[in-house]
Image: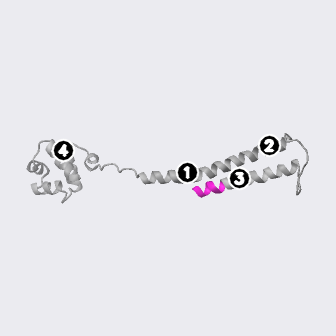
């Protein structure tokens, strides 16, 4: 790659290998070796080469930017979507629990006993039910979030 760049810059300046070699105080064979990537110029010669060809060392040595890995981007999206549904479900349940707690705390749920064959539900038991549901959802969301990292 460097050799090809040297050759292209030399030809663009209208210099032969012999002429460039003379300006750099090296042999024509050395220039040929550089251009064919059989050798690389040392730091001193590289500086002189850049000056002679009218480019900076950064331009001379610049490598093409590496392509982004498509697979890495896809894997990140897969990992995110893997946790998106559980987090949304936990957030929805947490919202329901929070609304239930607010309704119970403000007395918006009418106070009456609902009899069933097993348990009698009162405002207090419904309040604690929402409290436990909310705490469980918050804990589940926290665990899922920490696992994601």
Q: Earlier in the sequence, mark 2 or mark 3?
A: 2
- Which SS class for mark 1? helix
Residue under label 1: 81
Q: CA distance from mark 2 to mark 3?
A: 16 Å
Q: Are marks 4 and 3 in contact (CB under 8 Å)?
A: no
- Choose the circle earlier in sequence order: 4 or 2: 4
**Which mark, by number, is residue 102?**
2
Q: Nearer the viewer, mark 4 or mark 2?
A: 2
Circle nearer the viewer, 4 or 1? 1
| Label 4 – label 1 distance at C-alpha | 53 Å
Identified at 39% across, 50% down, the residue is 68
Looking at the image, residue 141 sits to the left or right of residue 109; the answer is: left
| SS at circle 4 | helix
**Distance between mark 4 and mark 3 Cα atoms:** 68 Å
Mark 1 or mark 2: name the one nearer the start of the chain.
1
* Left or right, residue 79 beside residue 129: left
Q: Which residues are magenta?
A: 142-149
Q: Is residue 146 magenta?
A: yes
Q: Is residue 107 above or below residue 134?
A: above
Q: Which mark is residue 137?
A: 3
């Amino acid at each position: 790659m460097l050799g090809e760049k040297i050759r292209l810059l030399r030809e663009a300046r209208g210099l032969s290998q012999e002429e460039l070699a003379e300006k750099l105080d090296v042999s024509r064979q050395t220039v040929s070796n550089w251009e064919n990537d059989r050798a690389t110029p040392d730091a001193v010669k590289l500086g002189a080469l850049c000056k002679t060809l009218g480019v900076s060392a950064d331009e001379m040595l610049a490598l093409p930017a590496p392509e982004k890995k498509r697979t890495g981007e896809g894997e990140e999206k897969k990992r995110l979507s893997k946790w998106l549904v559980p987090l949304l479900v936990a957030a929805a349940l947490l919202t329901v629990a929070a609304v239930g707690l607010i309704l119970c705390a403000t007395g918006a749920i009418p106070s009456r006993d609902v009899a069933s064959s097993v348990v009698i539900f009162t405002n207090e038991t419904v309040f604690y039910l929402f409290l436990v549901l909310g705490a469980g959802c918050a804990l589940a969301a926290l665990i899922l979030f920490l696992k994601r990292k």
